[in-house]
Image (cartoon, grey):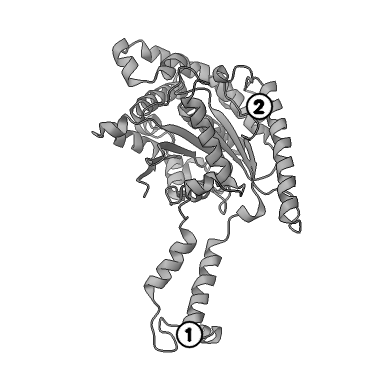
Amino acid sequence: MIESIKTNFDQFIFQQQTSDNQELLNSSVLIVAVLGKEVSDNTKADLLNDFLGERVFFEDEMDKNNFLNCVNKTENVRMESSPLIDIHFDKEESIIWLIINGFNDIEFQHLLFNNINENFKNKSFFEKMSFVDREQLFALAQIFPLCHALIFMKQGCRFDLEWICLLKRLNKLRSSISRRIRSSFSSIPETELSTKFSSSFVNTCRIGASPRLLFCFHRNPLRSDLNATKKKELLEKMEKCLETQIANLLKQHGLVDIKHPNSSFAQITIASGTPFVYCFNQSEIPVDVNNELAEALFGSLGQMTGGEDEVSSNKSGNLGNGNCINSEEILRLINQITEPSKLDKKELENSSDYNFPFFLHKAINKLRRDLTSNKVQNTPLPTLGQFIEAAKLLKLCIYEEKNGESFDSKVTISPEIESINRLDWANKGI
């Protein structure tokens, strides 16, 4: 049984820094983050829940609405990191999972653009988009130095150039945040510095080597009438084409350095047999849980009563034969459909099926081996305590950067929004 801690990022940091469990705080951890656009029936949370085998992440529209309600109202709220960064600590695997929710997700934009939220009712379209763009970048700036790997999720099957723009702006912002981190180091005694923070964080302002990037694409364009062998062959070709395209773009924009991966902004796995791109097949498309649940319940009632006609004729909780609906049976069906099943890691390791759990499991194992071998010098896995200290310092530096006099708004606004803003200012005579 996995012992899990799922909560908001700030709550997790507060809970763990007050913990007296030194064994837990001294345990080494791997940090993996997930971001990208999502729709209501296919979320990052659901994907990770299925991989982890338990429902540790969930979507909550109230959290997003509360975040929008609190924007720029009090110093305390602005001091906190985004409530849309969720965290889960898997003690069994010693992995910290992070999810950046909201921003470009459908539900979040629904709150912004349907005038549901009072803070944004009188804002223009581009003011709202500038806010989304800025907050997403700062959320990523907070978790990027803490991560060993970032997984980008895309609902289509084409690489989104917006990710390149986002990473380039993050790279510009990173140098300013790094200066703030180093400035904070100057006030900490050297003996305390070496124990509170990992050596990598002290030297490079990152908790490990440059983060490894993984890209996952939904809704491939393959025809449904193709046989499984042909689909697998075409998906592999698509993945290799996407890998070549993404690698060239990342190198062209100076975001990765194949010759010196550990010192670059980020890195990708070029080695044969360790892909960094995954395309979901049709069988992995999420099902309609409500529909599945209804069919299972009515199917179960039909078996108990002897037919569908008898089920439809019963409006109450009593069945036609005098029996009552078994609540335990209903609960079992609900759990069977809605709760993810625990993956057997040993079976996954030797599986002949190439699916998302296999891809992610293999990528994590490869990353862990590289970090614990001689391939990556001076970047041992941080302890949970060192992760917490680095996260606290980063939160403070991000807050100062967002509200400081040296803040450069151009760094945090996409070129498209900046161009439209300039036209708007010109029309107003500003």
In the rendered view, tell whether residue 343 sits above or below residue 397: below
- Could you tell me which residue is drawn at 66 percent across and 50 percent down? 281
Which residue corresponds to mark 1?
305
In the rendered view, tell whether residue 337 sits above or below residue 316: above
Check disc 1 and report its element: helix, strand or loop: helix
Occupied quadrant, residue 332: bottom left
Q: Where, quadrant-wise, is the C terminus in this rendering? A: top right
Occupied quadrant, residue 411: top right
Check disc 2 and report its element: helix, strand or loop: helix
Say which amino acid is labelled 1: Thr
Which residue corresponds to mark 2?
415
- Could you tell me which residue is drawn at 40 percent across and 35 percent down? 73
Say which amino acid is labelled 2: Pro
Image coordinates of residue 51 in percent, x first then y, are 50, 47
Image coordinates of residue 90 in percent, x first then y, are 40, 41
**The one of 117 and 56 positioned closer to us in this rendering:** 56
- Could you tell me which residue is drawn at 74 percent across and 46 percent down? 233
Real-space Cα separation, disc 1 to disc 2, in angstroms: 64 Å
Image coordinates of residue 133 in percent, x first then y, are 56, 33
- Could you tell me which residue is drawn at 46 percent across and 26 percent down? 372
Which is closer to the viewer, label 1 or label 2? 1
User: Left or right: where does residue 277 sit relative to residue 296?
Assistant: right
**The one of 216 and 400 positioned closer to us in this rendering:** 216
Image coordinates of residue 250 in percent, x first then y, are 66, 25
Categorize mark 2 by other alpha carbons within 10 Å: few (<14), some (14-19), many (20+).
few
In the rendered view, tell whether residue 120 sits above or below residue 42: above
